[in-house]
Image (spheres, rainbow, N blue to C red):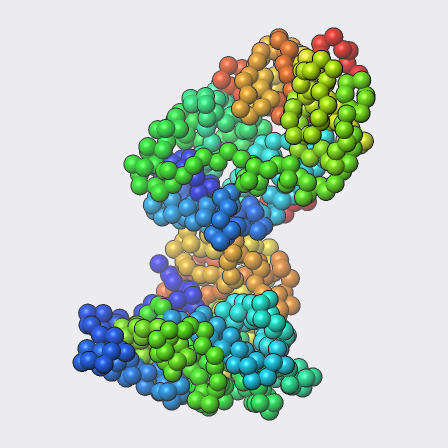
Amino acid sequence: MHYLDHAATTPMLPEAMAAVQAELGRVGNPSSVHAAGRRARRVVEESRETVAASFGARPSEVVFTSGGTEADNLAIKGLYWSRQAADPRRVRIITSSVEHHAVLDPVQWLADHEGAVLDLLPVDERGRVDPEELRRRIAQEPGDVALVSVMWANSEVGTVQPVAECAAVAHEFDVPFHTDAVQAGGQLPVDFVGSGVDALTLSAHKLGGPLGVGALLVGKTVSLTPVLHGGGQEREIRSGTLVAPSIAGFAVASAVVTRDRVARTERLASLRDRLVAGILQQVPDAVYNGDPVSDPACRLPGNAHLSFPGCEGDSLLLLLDAQDIACSTGSACSAGVAQPSHVLLAMGATPQVARSSLRFSFGHDSSDADVDALLAVIVPVVQRARSAAAVAEVRVQ
Amino acid sequence: MRVVAALSGGVDSAVAAARAVDAGHEVVGVHLALSTHPQSFRSGARGCCSLEDSRDARRVADVLDIPFYVWDFAERFRVDVLDDFVAEYAAGRTPNPCVRCNERIKFVAVLERALALDFDAICTGHYARIVPGDEGPELHRAVDHAKDQSYVLAMLAPHQLSRVLFPLGDAVKAEVRAEADRRGLLVADKPDSHDICFIPDGDTRGFLQRHVGERPGVIVDESGAELARHDGAWGVTVGQRHGLGVGTPAVDGAPRYVLSIEPVTRTVTMGPRELLSVTVIECGSATWCGPAMLDGSRRDVQWRAHGESVSASVAVDRAGQLSVTLDQPAEAVAPGQTLVVYDGSRVVGSATVAAARPAELAAP
């Protein structure tokens, strides 16, 4: 199989697998006082230090969660409730229109149930927010802003956001700033303290660690209302027994990706650039979405996102799947039904163009053979998908 | 062959797909998303297109070890089946949405998409047989007459029949359940679906009331005397006796039945059972499953999915419209129903009922 869907999940690094496996056979609740507990606790705390060091945070700023979605929910709801408790006028949540649903949906939930007001930042045709626009939005009524959340890098089109600038703008008004760095974590230099953000979401399985674990990095002075209540673990911000094996795997993966990042970034970008150039050469009317600049400061090195006019993304995916090539339409599903991507729509694409898109994403075990396999079949696949869409079009007319 | 197996999440389509795999075909499972608002587990309702059905369909594909996709035909379904269903009732006719879905979605839109994506055929769990004949493939009743679904497939033309597999045509339902169980398909015990898929609670009148709104009119007897008023004749069908709230009995105490529904004035006429009796059924243009039928043939006809077929003489005019004269008078033939013509077990063709009348009345 040629796996070009690393943005969905990437294979576990062998080092991470070994760490998880080693820990799975050992007993001990990290919260227990006895020797077994202390041993497990030591694994968790060493892992916390490793994760912190990998992402420019202090160990005490690492709050382990069950993954990216939980971390995003904790950040959005936790910051909102805490800011509300301090001043009930703070109802406005400013976020970008291209966030992952793990951010957009908690915001929408707060709007539906808790009186929050959703304020969506527009993006340009590359999918990037403008910090000046953020400043204008906050300045309209700084006293009613609860929080700002802008993702580090987009999960669909790979566009890197000016996170540090946005965080600085929010801080001009003393508004806390969260960023979802789930996609960035494995590919870009993510520096929590250096970026100036107050809360940052990470997910282990996107960077070569196990599924089901992640973290919210939370600045020491940031006040956050808990979402999960119970045993009071993780500074009482996130209750629940600490999952030592997963956390150990997460830490090892974080260390490996940080150690190898520069070389890997270069390799991913070169695979991606060859894939994009090959597709555009063979399918001249394909459109490369997102930021065309290859620099990792602009675009995730492992991300390619293209529209194939006249095709349904679903058809392309099925046809490539039949050729043993795995990719994604990149958009969220409801009962398995693809909706046109809100990200592409926010970037100005028509629903039709949005539905004609595919995301190819590379990871640590990607190779030239994967690129070759795709380039060998893309022309007949696009032709076939185009004829299928044309049949449906005629019927509709 | 490369085959798309439509997987509804039910037991029949699951076993049909399994048999297609056994037959050596390269099978891909496809679940059709037909609802624009799929019901979640939380809603608790059991109907078509729920997330539960989608999951069940996926699990069938897992067990059969075939690829699985969801194809979104919700918008097409809304326009071609749902809106059509509402419009037909609003026009005083009695539609069959399953016929419409087969005729516009499953064996047209889905089949076309499958063929365009380089598949050779689609496979469904319908109970009907496709038999090679001298003049091409023939559509026949299923071996299991109690489950026979040839009626709702009678609109299939030869070019469609040659691209369709019905692996359950020679099966009986009990066998199919046992086979599902034997194959480890978890849907073996799932209850059959009987209702209209988009009205899972079975309340057709309530559904139409929501979609059509209030359409008041009068209910009269056969002499034109007003019996009652109604807020809307939602889902009322010729031959219906209950549910209209007419309290006054007829003079002779006999029950009254719906004789006709006039769509413009929304007048519902009711009368004694004997006035329901018809002998001549006029239909629109026929579609033929094979060669067009000759005028004046003796055939069996059926106008309800679960009704009996009866013998009749079938006339075909130059425009291809059917006029059917029943050997014995029958009751409750409603405009909008699909009339299917059989020759023994073979489906000859079908047409939509336009009007029905007793033999002694001349055609208008």
Residue A179 location (% of width, % of height): 50, 79
Look at 49% across and 17% down and name the residue there.
Answer: B345
The image shows residue B106 at horizontal and vertical percentages of 54, 38
In this rendering, the answer to whether B73 lies above or below A182 is above
Q: Nearer the viewer, residue B228 or A393?
A: B228
Give above or below for B178 relative to A128: above
Where residue B249 appears, as percent x and y from the top left, is: 71, 20
Q: Nearer the viewer, residue B269 or A23?
A: B269
Give the quarter of the figure containing the N terminus of chain B. top left
Identify which residue, A264 or B78, lies in the foreground.
B78
Instruction: Count numbered badges in the picture.
Output: 0
Closest to the observer: B127 or B1? B127
Does the image show residue B352?
no
Q: Dividing the image into 4 quarters, which one contains the C terminus of chain B?
A: top right
- Residue drawn at (62%, 77%), measured in percent from left and top? A92
Report the side of A284 relative to A221 (left or right): right
Query: Left or right: A212 with respect to B332?
Result: left
* B227 to the left or right of A1: right
Q: Residue at x 64, y 85 (%)?
A: A143
Location of residue A227 in the rendering, given as x and y in whole percent from the top left corner: 45, 73
Could you tell me which residue is drawn at 58 percent across and 67 percent down? Answer: A113
Q: Is residue A325 visible?
A: yes
> Where B77 sits versus B265, above or below?
below
Q: Quadrant of residue A174?
A: bottom right
